[in-house]
Amino acid sequence: MYRQFIPYNNNYYGWLRPASEYHNFLRETRAPIVGTSSDSGEAAVFGSNEATTPPTGGGAGGSGVFGLSVSPGAAGVFGANNSTKGVGVQGNGPEAGISGFSDRGAGVRAHSNHGNGVEGFAHDANGAAILAINNATTAPTVNDGSPRGSGVLGMTTVPDGAGVFGANNSTKGRGVQGNGPEAGVGGFSEGGNGVLAQSKTGIGILAQGGRLAGKFEGNVEVTGNLNVNGFIYMGGDTVTPLGAWLSRIRQLEAEVADLRSRLPVSGTFAGSTTTTPSATVDVEMIPRTGPFNDLRVFGSGFLPNEPIEITYNSTPEGGNSGTTEATADSLGRFSNTIGVSCSPGIRYTAYARGKQSGRISNTAGASC
C-alpha cells in the first residue's frame, strides 16, 4: 500500500489549480507497481512495449501503458502536474500526439477556468493548427434549432465576443474563408445585421460573380454616393445605358425650364392679357486688387442654351460701358463676369436680352 497527499477538489475540472486552493485529503493508492522519483531527468514509472508488429484483435494491444477504469466519472488514465509550469499529460506520436475516441460523447474534451480550452499550433505552412472534419454523408435527423452537422461549431456568451473569430496577421490573405455549394459564408441575426462588413481604408464589401456580383431581395438604402459604370436595368425587357437616362433627365429639365420661362410675370387677371415671360437678372460687384473690379451679371428665364446679349453702363462717366455675350444653360440660366474700372462714386447697371426669344430682362445695378 502506498500513501501520498494529492491536491483534490470535488470540481472535476479543478485538478490543475494550485494545491493551496484546496484541502489536502489523505487518499490511498493501491497498485501492483508504484514508482517515485526525485530526479527531474527521470520518470517515476516507465512502460515500454518493444513489439515491432501491429496489434491484432482490436482493443489497446501494443500500448506502452494501458489504463482502465469502470468507476463512473473517473479517468482510465489520469495525469497531473502540480508545479507552476508544464502539462498534465504529454503524448508524442508519428500520426497524432494524443488521440481520443467516444462512441456517444466527445472524442476529446478540454476545459480551462482561466485560459484557452483548446490550443493548437502548427509549424508547417501546408498544415492547419486545428483541423475539424465531419464526414457524415446524411442530413441531420435532429431538428432542435442547433447547428448540427457542422465541421466547426463556435459559441460564446461573452458580450461583444465572437462565436468564431479568424485573423490573418500576415500581409496577404483572409481572416476567414468559407466554401460551400450554396453559399461560401452565411450570416443571420434575429434583430441586427446579418453580415457586417467594415474597412478602415479599403472596401467594406467586394463582390465578384460570374452572373451577378450582388442581388438584393428587398429595399436598398444608400447614404453616400452611388457610382455606376455601365448599364442600369430598369425592368421589363429593355436595358438602357446610364448615359441615356441622364440625357433624358437633362432634356426633361430643359423642357421644364422652358415652360417656367413662358409663365406670366404677374399672372393673368380679369381684364388683363399680360403674358410677358419673366426674364430676370441681378448684378454684384466683386472687389479686386488695383483699379479694376469684377462685375458679375447673372439671371434666368431664357430659353435653354439660348445666346444672350448683356448690356452694361456706368454713371457718372469714368467707368466702362459696352456689351458682351453669354449662353444660357439647359435650365435657361446664365452667369458672366466682366472686368470694369471702379472708383468711389461710380455705379454700374446691366440688363440682358435673349437673341432667340427676344426676352428682355429687368435692369439691375451695383456700386463700386
Image: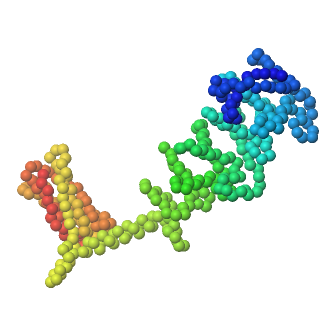
Q: Is residue 228 left or right of residue 319?
A: right
Return the x and y of residue 216 as percentages of the image width and height. Answer: 54, 61
Is residue 120 visible from the viewing direction of this image? no
Splitting the image into 4 quarters, where does residue 237 fall?
bottom right
Return the x and y of residue 40 as percentages of the image width and height. Answer: 75, 17
Q: Residue at x 14, y 59 (%)?
A: 365
Q: Nearer the viewer, residue 132 or 228?
A: 132
Residue lying at the far bottom in this picture: please name it. 271
In this rendering, the answer to whether 164 lies above or below 247 is above
Q: Nearer the viewer, residue 1 or 198?
A: 1
Residue lying at the far front in this picture: please name it. 26
Q: Residue at x 9, y 53 (%)?
A: 346
Q: Is residue 209 left or right of residue 37?
A: left
Splitting the image into 4 quarters, where does residue 57 fall?
top right
Splitting the image into 4 quarters, where does residue 271 fall?
bottom left
Q: Residue at x 16, y 83 (%)?
A: 270
Return the x and y of residue 266 as percentages of the image width and height. Answer: 18, 74
In this rendering, the answer to whether 233 lies above or below 118 is below
- What colouring style does the render use? rainbow
Identify the image quadrant of the N terminus.
Answer: top right
Is residue 2 visible from the viewing direction of this image? yes
In this rendering, the answer to whether 337 lies above or below 44 is below
Q: Residue at x 32, y 71 (%)?
A: 256
Return the x and y of residue 366 as percentages of the image width and height. Answer: 14, 56
- How many numbered marks are there? 0
Q: Nearer the viewer, residue 92 or 267?
A: 92
Q: Is residue 240 left or right of residue 145?
A: left
